[in-house]
Image (tube, rainbow, N blue to C red):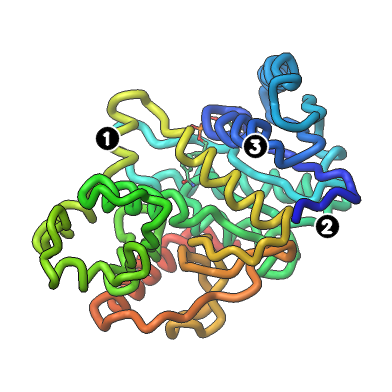
Amino acid sequence: MANTKTSRKVAIVGVGGVGMGCAYSILNQGLVDEMVLIDVAGDKADGEARDLMDGVTYAPENCKVYHGDYSDCKDAQMVIITAGINQKPGQSRLELVGTNAKIMRSIVKEVMGSGFDGNLVIVSNPVDVLTYVAWDESGLPQNRVIGTGTSLDSTRLRMQLSNKTGVDAHDISAYIVGEHGDSEQPLWSQATIGGKPLMDWIEDGDEGVIKKDELEDIRKTVRDAAYYIIDRKKITNWGIGLSTARLVRAILENEHAILTTSAYFNGEYGLKDIYTGIPAIVGENGVERIVEMHITDEEMAGLHKSASELKEVLDSVRE
Ligand code: 6V0
């Protein structure tokens, strides 16, 4: 149930395409009472706030949107960080790490300096590495620093399975785990359509259902979705905006929803001291618990390979 007792306030740091995709989705879903926009480009943040505010009477709930500074984070339940450079055509997310890790540390320092004591949601790429960096800099408990992880990839996978089967994506449960990026791993063994395992649909050969040898194409389409979009419109922003709003809702409304966030591993799936995408239960305290599923050996190997690639990149920016 919505928390109606206290003012629901979020701060968004970074008002580029992604920050505004998040802001628009959050506003349009009536998730908060107050939204502060922060950016080194102050005039842009001011203009964006004014633009959104102009439409508030058509949003489902009243909301005060304004341009602010880090002192405004003090009483926010959540700070969403989307600041940083984005991928250029052909560039991988991991190539952004040097610049964005520095930006992330400087922002988190400012946020924590305000006296902020809520949940930090990290969106900037490479999101798994930067979520670790943000946690390391913040001094917050691991569960309260959350990356958007493979939430976008998982919804892309559900859409692809929906396109193939003709079944509503809302009735499809499917997860991508590991890096939000090139080494990500789909969990085919855990995917279900209307409660029936995907592998049973394939085995039964139900009419209109995908065949096993089509799974590899689906995996590639999902993995390369950002490259496809960036080639055409230079950025991706609406899908991640909606994915972030889903995470914001789960936290602010204490939903205990299962979402594929970038969560901190403390031995789950045999992984330690890393943030990466995994289905986890999410509520008002952030990640309550990683869900341990009985995945296949091949899927486990894919998750471990992805985690070890992330560790290597993380080691290059540790302080
Ligand atoms: P953008 O449109 O260039 O916006 C970035 C914004 O950050 C700009 O407004 C900058 O002024 C601002 N900024 C830069 N440095 C600072 C700083 N030190 N303090 C405050 N503000 C700053 O980029 P875009 O919005 O497209 O992308 C932002 C980030 O999101 C990139 O790292 C993307 O790679 C990442 N994405 C993450 C996704 C995910 O699934 N996690 C999906 C898409 C993009």
Q: Nearer the viewer, mark 3 or mark 2?
A: 3
Mark 2–mark 1 Cα distance, whole angstroms, equals 38 Å
Q: Could you say where residue 148 lies in the image, as x and y percent from the top left? A: 53, 53
Q: Which image quadrant for residue 86?
A: top left
Q: Earlier in the sequence, mark 3 or mark 2?
A: 3
Label 1 or label 3, whichever lies nearer to me, is: 3
Q: Position of residue 6 (x, y in %)?
A: 90, 49
Determine the residue positioned at 15% across, 57% down.
210
Residue found at x 81% / y 35% = 34
Question: Is 141 rendered above or below residue 126?
Answer: below
Circle 1 is placed at which residue position?
228
Which circle marks residue 35 in the picture?
none
For label 2, the residue is 117
Q: Is residue 182 left or right of residue 170?
A: left
Which amino acid lies under the numbered mark 1 shown in the image of this protein?
A: Tyr
- Marked residue nearer the N-terminal end (1 or 3): 3
Residue 7 vertical position relative to residue 209 in the rendered view, above or below: above
Residue ID at (21%, 71%)? 199
- Residue 311's x, y, as percent? 43, 68
Q: Is residue 160 visible?
A: yes
Q: Amino acid at mark 3?
A: Gln
Instruction: Tell me the element at label 2.
Output: loop
Q: Quadrant of the C terminus?
A: bottom right
| Disc ID at residue 29 | 3
Q: Of callouts 2 and 1, which one flags the residue occurring earlier in the amino acid sequence? A: 2
Note whether residue 223 is visible: no
